[in-house]
Amino acid sequence: MEHVSVLLEPSIQALNLRKDGIYVDLTLGRAGHSSRILQAIPQGHLYAFDLDLTAIEESREKLSKIGDNFTLIHSSFAKLKECLASYGVDKVDGILADLGVSSPQFDDPKRGFSYRYDARLDMRMDVTSPLSAYEVVNTYSEKELLRVLNDYGEERDAYRIVKNICKARQDHPITTTMELVDIIKSSKSAATLAKKGHPAKQTFQALRIEVNGEAKALQAMLEDAPGMLISGGRLAIITFMSLDDRMTKLRFRELTTLEGDRHDIFLRPEDIATPKFHLATRKPILPSEEDLAANPRAASAKLRVLVKD
């Protein structure tokens, strides 16, 4: 299945692109968003990050047909500030992050992301990374596995799943996605299994986040990215999971509000402190019916936009 960029038009509009601006796409993927950005900045420059070398090479060919004013960076966006500093860049006009996993990764059985295909447990966005889902499932302690499933999957049956994983791996390593799916199913009640949605979804999500350090990377990016914006610059983030959206929402709220809501009555208006950022829209931007028709995976997407004053 070809990857369809979610909230493409709203996110491009949210960046308020300038022809000579410097922009960053933190999640290059197959260059859906990056292509549109590059088309709009003929005198500017685009920096794009991705952990997936295959995505980088495919996107390089695609972007080269538009222009040569781009730089592709094989790195986690947790290193945004460090990587851009190596190119002499410390301020940018806009930053975009689409936190969904690209369809080519999910739909390639060999990558071991999906609970719908039988493959070796992997889930690495960066195939050069030493940590895969196989290592997490087979070497993490019971306590560590519980942390992963509770924190990153919000899995209600985490305790039973972890107990059964630890029991199964005593006999032999859990090697494939379907072996893990069977363990997860055996850990759930008939009533739970009868509910809508795949029973392994939350566990696979949690393992993917742990393997790729997604939560830590997002936290680091949310700390650094706002400070890299010029006045009027924008940070646009598309989330799909409640965990990511909660982290983004809380960070944006922190940046757009001041502690306390009372001011000294003797202060002049110009002396009253004001936040250095504001939200482009009070509520997140959601997918349109057209978005959902083109890509059903967009159903949970939310776009939040932070503006530097």
Image: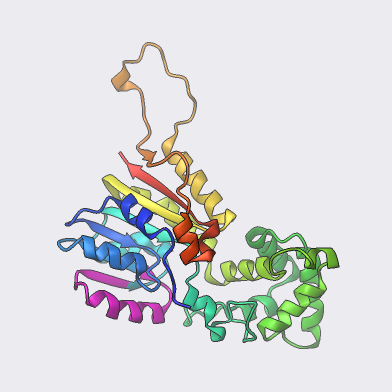
Q: Is residue 125 at all visible to an observer of this figure?
A: no
Left-right relation of 208 to 61: right
In this view of the protein, which residue sits in the foreground, 16 or 92? 16
Task: Write the start and end of the magenta stretch as one range.
Answer: 49-72
Name the spot of residue 265 as percent of width and height, x first. Answer: 40, 12
**Above or below: residue 283 compared with residue 165:** above
**Above or below: residue 56 compared with residue 189:** below
Name the spot of residue 200 as percent of width and height, x first. Answer: 70, 71
Left-right relation of 14 to 245: left
- Residue visible at 22% across and 77% down? 65
Name the spot of residue 48 as percent of width and height, x first. Answer: 32, 67
Residue found farthest to the bottom: 172
Q: How is the image coloured?
A: rainbow
In this view of the protein, which residue sits in the foreground, 223 or 93? 93
In this view of the protein, which residue sits in the foreground, 213 or 103? 103
Residue found farthest to the top: 266
Left-right relation of 295 to 50: right
**The quadrant where residue 150 appears:** bottom right
> How many labels were placed on the picture?
0
In this view of the protein, which residue sits in the foreground, 75 or 7? 7
**The quadrant where residue 131 appears:** bottom right
- Residue visible at 50% across and 46% down? 249
- Residue visible at 62% across and 86% down? 120
- Per the image, is 84 magenta? no
- Residue visible at 28% across and 80% down? 61
Q: Is residue 242 at all visible to an observer of this figure?
A: yes
Q: Quadrant of the C terminus?
A: top left
Name the spot of residue 148 as percent of width and height, x first. Answer: 66, 64
